[in-house]
Structures are given as C-alpha cells and as structure tokens.
Image (cartoon, rainbow, N blue to C red):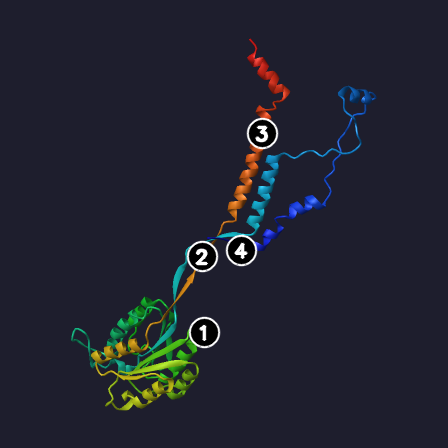
Amino acid sequence: MLTFAYPWLALIAPLPLAVWLLLPAHASNRTGLRVPFFDRLAALSGQSPQIGGVIAPRRTLPLLVLILCWLLAVAALARPQWIEPPLHQDRPTRDLLVLVDLSGSMDTKDFVDASGRTVDRLTAVKQVLDDFLSRRKGDRVGVVVFGDAPFVLVPFTTDLDLCRALLRDTVVGMAGPRTAFGDAIGLGIGLFDHSTVKAKTIIALTDGNDTASKVEPVDAAGVARDRGIVIHTVAVGDPTAAGEDKLDEGALKEVASTTGGGFFRALDRAQLAEIYQRLDQIETRKIETVSFRPKRDIYWVPVAAGLSLSLLLQAVRLLRRRYLHPSPRTSDAAISRGAP
C-alpha cells in the first residue's frame, strides 16, 4: 500500500499556477535594427506596425513536461512510502529470575538422576532446571547464584540457551560455602528495577538456612511484595539435618506466603521434577504478539521519473533540430554529397 509521510505538502502543488496568474509576465529586451525605410517595408508586407510587446507562445509538449516534473518533485518532497505486509513479533511478558544455592551443602549426594545414578543436589537441580528453562519460550530469564554473597550469573535475557549453558558450568562452592539467601533476594529485586513487564517472578532453590545475609529473607520478601514480585521457594535440603546444613522451612514458607508465591519441598529428583511441572502450570507462559508494518521509502521513484522526462524532452528537441530544422551548413553538405 502506498502512503505519504508528509501529505500536506500537496498544498504547494498549485503554487506555479498562482504565480502565473498573479505575477506579471517576464519581460526581456532584444537588440533591434533601425532602418530608415521601415514604413516602406511594412507597406510591402501588408502589416500595420503597433507599439507594444510580443508574448512568445509556449509549446504544448514542453509545458506538459514542465507540469509533470513539478508534480513529481512535490510527490518526492511528500516522501512516498510503500507499506510492506505486516510482521508479527512476540514480546516477553514475564521476567523470571532463578536463585540457585551454591553453598557447600549442595554437594551432598542424596538425589538419584534419570539413569539411577546417585548425584549431588546441585547436579539434580541443574538437570531438572535445564528442562524447565527449555520450556520458558516467551519469558526473559535471569540467573543469580549465591553462597557467601550473591552474584549475577546471567542478567535478564531471552537467550535461554545461554542461561542453560552457564548454569551447567556452575559448581558447588564457587560463590562461597555459606548461604546468603536474604542478600540473594535483595540482589534479585535490584535486577527488576528496569523491568517494564507486568509479571515478575523469582524461583529460589536452597538447601540450608540463611547464615551470611545482611538482610533477613523475610524483610527482603516484604520489599519484593511491594514491588509486585512473586517468590516461589523450593527446599532441596534434608529437613532432619542439624547445624548450618539445617533447612529453615519456616523462613522459606514465610518468604513465599509474603509475596503470594508457593513453597515446595524436594526430597528426591522425581519430586523436584514434579515441582517444576507445577511451577510451569502456575507460571503459565504469556506471549504478547505485536504486529507492525515496515515502511520503505520510494521517494527516488518520482525523482527518477522527473529526470527521465526532462532528459527525454531534451532528446526530442535535439532530434527535431537535427532532422526537421537542419542548419545551413548541414544542408549544403547534404547537397554536396548528393551531387553527381
């Protein structure tokens, strides 16, 4: 479909007509020859000399070409654009942040993988989380790992393959042996500062109680609630453990309930996979489809048409002058060539 970016420029199209009607004709003086026998020449020619100017008639073809060139120039100034067929683009409507505990207790081998082999907690979490992330098409996903302190592993991105690849490279203890769960929530809240989507979700996975945070997890959850962030907590530790490895289920439940999220307990890999299936149902993927039609500028078309018309008119003039009105030298040469 053809459209114009500045259609109001069509108002200047009648401007030459207004100039022709309102302004006087252009006057030009030509050199004349005075002869004493002018009256005799006039009498012999049968004409009556008068005082005044002579308006030279304009030929039809050059006038039409001039008008067309002007209209084409106005059309080019109006910036014609060709609207392409509509394109559809999917935009993410949710920012999903995953908090992964890398403290020393995640090295405990009490999970069984799909092949029946006993693996540590982090390996089981990564295996199931990898499958979960592969189905999050339409979401922006970020990853924060925490131990003694939290660190951003992957900022929010739609490149899920990047998230999965970097998550597979994580190892126990790379962020320190202790657990700073509250600080991890605080860092996650800061990552949402520039988020413009409506749905904001945090999935936190930890197997121990908070031993290194400067901010209590419940206090951080209150800030998240005020900013519209929902936190789901997944406990992957042993509830019967003692000491620093003891799982503080009460804090995890309170964090989830404060933000309107859910608390889940995973004692084996099958239960962990079931939790992700439930989270996939709760956090349904929502994709906003945006349609837009690209515009391609074609102002060069009227410019090229005007230039072609002008050149064509000049070519016609040259041909007429050469063959219909030859110069005396050309005529003499033609006669000489034709003489026997």
Q: Distance between the Cα atoms at labels 1 and 2?
A: 28 Å
Q: Nearer the viewer, residue 20 or 187?
A: 20
Do the residues bearing badges 4 and 3 touch, measured as CB atoms within 8 Å?
A: no
Residue drawn at (52%, 49%) of the image: 299
Residue drawn at (61%, 35%) of the image: 60
Q: Nearer the viewer, mark 4 or mark 1?
A: 4
* Amino acid type, residue under disc 3 in the picture: Leu
Q: Could you say which disc has been placed on residue 194 in the image?
A: 1
- Crowd class of label 3 (few under 14; some 14 to 19; many from 20; radius 10 Å): few
Earlier along the polypeptide chain: callout 4 or callout 1? Answer: 4
Q: Is residue 316 left or right of residue 280?
A: right
Q: Nearer the viewer, residue 41 or 72?
A: 41
Residue at the spot of label 4: 5
Looking at the image, which residue sits at the far right? 36
Residue at the spot of label 3: 318
**Residue 189 in picture, x, y percent from top left:** 41, 79
Q: Could you say which disc has been placed on residue 316 in the image?
A: none
* Amino acid type, residue under disc 2 in the picture: Pro
Looking at the image, which residue sits at the far top? 340
Residue at the spot of label 2: 294
Earlier along the polypeptide chain: callout 2 or callout 4? Answer: 4
Q: Secondary structure at mark 2?
A: loop
